[in-house]
Image (tube, rainbow, N blue to C red):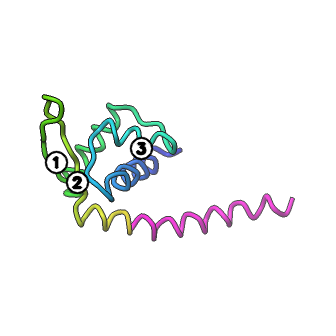
């Protein structure tokens, strides 16, 4: 898969993982595992990029005597998910067009 496309898909997956509730790194990886394999180093790079883009915010809270970073989606992040859904309709249309050739064989 093209690197830029995969990067965009991963960004949206991470945003979707925290859309309904704030979450932390290990839980995000665990929540995504049934759908996509994501390493810790890749996740934290994505989280930093999304934070810099204003799509999520970060807060630290103590958990079992240690500080844990919790990530919260912003309105900009929610809008990115909605934009992705619209963009994906076009990708599906292109996929169907490309697959049409296979159906006639």
How many angstroms separate mark 1 from mark 3 (CA)? 18 Å
In this rendering, position of residue 53 left or right of residue 61: right
From the image, tell me which residue sits under label 3: 31
* On-image quarter of the C terminus: bottom right
Kindly identify the residue that appears in the image at 33 percent across and 59 percent down: 20
Query: Of helix, strand and loop, which mostly describes the magenta segment?
Result: helix
| Label located before the other in sequence (1 or 3) | 3
Q: Residue at x 25, y 57 (%)?
A: 73
Q: In the image, is 69 to the left or to the right of 83?
A: left
Which circle's residue, 3 or 2, is located before the other in the chain?
Answer: 3
SS category of the residue bearing label 1:
strand
Residue reaching furthest to the top: 65
Nearer to the camera, 26 or 10: 26
What residue sits 59% from the left and 65% below the top? 92
Alpha carbons under labels 1 and 2: distance apart: 6 Å
Magenta span:
83-105
Residues at circles 1 and 2 in contact by the CB criterion of under 8 Å: yes
**Secondary element at tag 3:** helix
The reply to whether the magenta stretch includes residue 98 is: yes
Residue 15's label in the rendered image is: none
Residue 97: give x, y in percent of width and height.
68, 66
Q: Nearer the viewer, residue 103 or 11?
A: 11
Q: Which of label 1 and label 3 is nearer to you?
A: 3
Residue that label 1 marks:
58
CA gap, disc 3 and disc 2: 15 Å
Q: Position of residue 66 (x, y in %)?
A: 14, 29
Give the residue at mark 2: 72
């Amino acid at each position: 898969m093209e690197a830029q496309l995969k990067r965009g898909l991963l960004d949206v997956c991470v945003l979707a993982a925290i859309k309904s509730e704030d979450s932390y790194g290990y839980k995000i990886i665990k929540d995504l595992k049934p759908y996509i394999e994501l390493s810790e180093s890749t996740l934290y790079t994505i989280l930093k990029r999304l934070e810099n883009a204003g799509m999520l915010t970060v807060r630290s809270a103590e958990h079992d005597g240690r500080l844990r970073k919790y990530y919260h989606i912003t309105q900009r992040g929610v809008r990115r998910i909605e934009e992705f859904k619209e963009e994906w309709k076009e990708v599906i249309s292109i996929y169907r067009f490309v697959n049409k050739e296979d159906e006639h064989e």
